[in-house]
Amino acid sequence: MEATSTTSSAVHTDVFIKMVLSNWEQQNYRLNKFFDALTDSQFEAEVAPGRNRGIYLLGHLTAVHDSMITLLGLGQKLHPELEEPFIKNGDTPGSNPFSLADLKQYWQEVSSFLTAHFATMPAEAWFTGHSAVSAEDFAKEPHRNKLNIVINRTIHLSYHLGQLIFLKQK
Amino acid sequence: MEATSTTSSAVHTDVFIKMVLSNWEQQNYRLNKFFDALTDSQFEAEVAPGRNRGIYLLGHLTAVHDSMITLLGLGQKLHPELEEPFIKNGDTPGSNPFSLADLKQYWQEVSSFLTAHFATMPAEAWFTGHSAVSAEDFAKEPHRNKLNIVINRTIHLSYHLGQLIFLKQK
């Protein structure tokens, strides 16, 4: 009985990680496919009247995913300079000092960094606390682990993808 | 060693279910709070020019969550009549035969049904295949389980929440 239980639970751990990462990959695939089909002028347009521009959301998603590097204990942010214009501030005139080409490159760098590190993360490490939860809180709320960051950021990506698609003609 | 491993994996299973359900609950909480603050005329407006109306997205989310009842093996859909206007068809003039009051009630019914059943679902049942995956495919792809449906539908909800928020004045 115990052997069966151990085997069954070990399978679960691999399955959990696969569930979360496959949803993350699927949403990133959709977003990248969408970005690839967008023209420069579409990136410069607002997703809806008076709302964020495509280029702002590209910077925002890059900044949020860059923050995952520190949250997941994978190293230092690749582009900490994005936090001020794309997380602390909204999309206001003159608030973005970066070109579309630069932001596209940063997005690729951050995405590649995360993909490479996710592929080699030991299974147990996914279930340790992320860097923004204290050891005390994590002991009480063990679901606030690194894998949960990936679920949460997948949901966040999808929220903005739902807005970005308005940049395309119907 | 084996005892430790079993304990650790058992903790994972509970933690993992908690991760998925807490993200589901959090997004539903945000959406319900948003719906509660929306006026009837805001529900009738398009989220962006030429895009879906709020009332259509309410019907769409209700229909998609209603489908979770069968996918998760919890019973029959409560409102199968929503599939034709809100899943098979887009938001076209005259395509919605339901009043806002009816749709709000259906949304509450479906949400309450899922909440009650999620609370009593045995842990192991979450890791069985959902009703749209064959036994053969599930043997090869065990991540296509019932809990994965909840992750996926949470991501779907967030996609449309990102659009719905445009109904509110900035």
Image (cartoon, coloured by chain):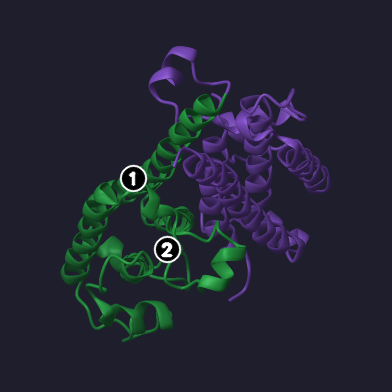
Chain colours: A purple, B green
Q: Amino acid at mark 1?
A: Glu
Q: Which mark is residue B25?
A: 1
Q: Position of residue A25 (x, y in %)?
A: 66, 53
- Chain letter for mark 1, please: B
Residue at 77% from the left image edge and 59% from the top image edge: A40
Secondary structure of the residue carrying tag 2 is loop
Q: Residues within 10 Å of mark 1 (few under 14, many from 20)?
A: few
- Chain letter for mark 2, please: B
Q: Residue furthest top?
A: A136
Q: Which mark is residue B47?
A: 2
Q: Are marks 1 and 2 on the same chain?
A: yes
Q: Is residue B125 above or below residue A91?
A: below
**Viewer-proximal residue among A9 and B93:** A9
Q: Quadrant of residue B103?
A: bottom left
Q: Are marks 1 and 2 in contact (CB under 8 Å)?
A: no
Q: Is residue B89 visible?
A: no
Residue at 51% from the left image edge and 24% from the top image edge: B4
Q: Using residue A103 as the reference point, say whether residue A47 is left or right of it.
A: left
Q: Amino acid at mark 2?
A: Val
